[in-house]
Amino acid sequence: MKASVATGHQTLSSEIVPIGSTRLDRWALERIQQTVASAPLRFALWDGFEIAPKAGPPVATIVFRNRRALFSWVWDPDLNFGEAYMFGAVEIRGDLESTLEAVYRGLVTKPRPWWLWQPPNSVRAAKENVHHHYDLGNEFYRLWLDQNMVYTCAYFPTPDCSLEDAQIAKMDLVCRKLHLKPGEHVVEAGCGWGTLALFMAKRYGVSVQAFNISTEQVAYARSRADKEGLGDRVEFIEDDYRNVQGRHDVFVSVGMLEHVGLADFSTLSAVIDRSLGEGGRGLLHFIGRNQPTPLNPWIRRRIFPGAYPPTLHEVFEQVLEPQGFSVLDVENLRLHYAKTLGHWCERFDGASDRVVTMFDDTFVRAWRLYLAGAQAAFTTGTMQLFQVLFARGASNAIPWTRVDG
Amino acid sequence: MKASVATGHQTLSSEIVPIGSTRLDRWALERIQQTVASAPLRFALWDGFEIAPKAGPPVATIVFRNRRALFSWVWDPDLNFGEAYMFGAVEIRGDLESTLEAVYRGLVTKPRPWWLWQPPNSVRAAKENVHHHYDLGNEFYRLWLDQNMVYTCAYFPTPDCSLEDAQIAKMDLVCRKLHLKPGEHVVEAGCGWGTLALFMAKRYGVSVQAFNISTEQVAYARSRADKEGLGDRVEFIEDDYRNVQGRHDVFVSVGMLEHVGLADFSTLSAVIDRSLGEGGRGLLHFIGRNQPTPLNPWIRRRIFPGAYPPTLHEVFEQVLEPQGFSVLDVENLRLHYAKTLGHWCERFDGASDRVVTMFDDTFVRAWRLYLAGAQAAFTTGTMQLFQVLFARGASNAIPWTRVDG
């Protein structure tokens, strides 16, 4: 281990320390255990030394394979939990998702907003951030998303609904909340592989301009539009949401707001305002928080650079209020996202042999951690999924009562 | 008119100026007309001088009966519109509610939050504020409220539902959103004449502690509980919401938050937090705004001292977020409040002869202005009615999907 530190390795390794643990190592393990004191987790060192949970039988054992992993975790657990797991320097013996749930529930000190500033996402940075995640290859996502390629929270009318049906139910819910009418014009900011845009055009008879800065996704979406004969009513535009032009009846954004970043909320606000006519309305579907909290630094480094899940107050204060928009309806679907992620985890695990050949072991571990961690975050209430329906403040062309279920 | 100013009258009078208008008077009228330039309203002076609306036929004529009313309006229209109408110094020839709608829609400069600070409502001030409005006599409110005495926004499942049924539908909507279960304990902050508390106990089998600082309302509520044999399950407590004690399953407040005032939001937040157990949840039903805006000063002076309708961001940032509550559901029912107020206005007008004998003409004009003004404010989107459902952030005992309709 000393050699590894001395040679300045930049990443944690899965190498096992060939020597027994010291009193200092055991003290460090004790400290780590105390940060999640009430969690039913066993902690162990490379030589078999263990600390049993304070209450109940353990749901899993977290094993540190070497000293570097141990002390990197003491130093910066938020970042190095992920780093150590990703590079195999920490092993989790037991179910990953249950372990992460136990961690979230047991955390003595919740991450607090002592430093919330993030640099604004310039148009170029936004493109790089999106490229990092969404341009991993359509083949990769096809392995574990539903057949329609929807990479956002689904809506399960009943808990035993299939993922395929739940994604369709989600799109339908969005359209019903927006009361889309044939002939209306919709602009979509961040359209993924184009599934919602095509759905709105086909099922609700609207025309859509859909924006996305992921080259791979836009290419895929365009070929679908052609195949389905919707090329005249759905236009996929490879450009930043900040370049949305024209006046539309509806502004919709599903799963993009969490990538915008607080620093650009006022820009987004102005874009929505100039995009909507007098009877304009919109829907924002995004991952959020109950309290302002920085996104986990490991997720920011490895999975979603530039991302920030906001609270409702941040969105209302900085995006909707400045333009006098009226909030009509908010729904929190976090348990639906936990279920969606459960499906994705299962499919991802089933496809992990294929993913290893496309990338490598480290990638697979990182993505398992991200998916299981997100599932645990939504299950434990650490993250929220909000759908916000809004309209021009003076418009009375708003629903009299809400759509059901 | 000069004499009236010289003798230092504190109120505007309905006296008509016996002399013709001057160029200065006409200039003032022109200025007033410009503040609502696009409104289809005719403005007139005591001697018959008129300014026609710039577009369309007038929906009404606003007549200034004397110079003092005219210049007081130029000086402080937000306050003196109400003062002048209330004392008969301004006459509205045409439908009052339509006139006020036209004013709201035509306002060139919306009231902006240049000065939002209001003094905190001490327990004593809160009692005085409530006494001012809610202790006008149960006989008075019985003349124009529904038979169950509910003085908050109703919920009309269909637009032609009666006011009586719509108030029951509103109470049922609140209970269904909260998923009340028999045997649970509910605390209600601000319970009016006790209608919701009794409804929850009777229809949903819960027990209720209901707080109110209006002496008249609490006495009435208690006698109803006795009459209905619910005295053992519904306790009406004549005390401030800040003195709520004990742990409960549910915190509900319908039509009180707008009387709390921003300065006391953190206190309310702490009260809700200490009142709720681990699986706790709650519902706040309140008049709100799309943007932070001071309450009209005439309404504050004559109708609701100490009141402030907040935005959602203010409520979330200052009441729910500090305790880590999770927002589950928000619904905006402003058009339902416009309809509710329409019913109240109609009943109030029908009972105005009785009201004159209980109070006087000035009181009747003030209340007509308040009710019609509120109706216009909700119709034009100047005011909102929010229902916010929330729960402990870590609780998964939350609805899987929302209740319908």
Image: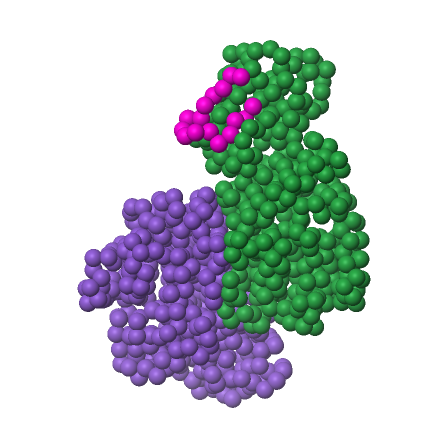
Chain colours: A purple, B green
Residue A316: x and y, percent?
A: 48, 51
**Quick one: which residue is furthest to the bottom in this view?**
A48
Residue A283 appears at what percent x and percent y? 41, 56
A361 horizontally vs A334: left or right = left
Q: Nearer the viewer, residue B226 or A168?
A: B226
**Quarter of the figure with residue A230:** bottom left
Return the residue nearer the eye: A209 or A249.
A249
What's the residue at 67%, 72% (across, down)? Answer: B182
Coordinates of residue B290 in the picture (x, y in percent) = 51, 46
**x and y percentages locating residue B81 in the rendered image:** 59, 29
Q: Quadrant of residue A148?
A: bottom left
x 58%, y 49%: residue? B340
| Vertical comparison of A272 with B194: above or below | above
Compare residues B249 and A278 and report the one nearer the observer.
A278
For the point 38% across and 48% down, the residue is A280
Q: Nearer the viewer, residue A258 or B308?
A: B308
Q: Which residues are magenta?
A: B48-63
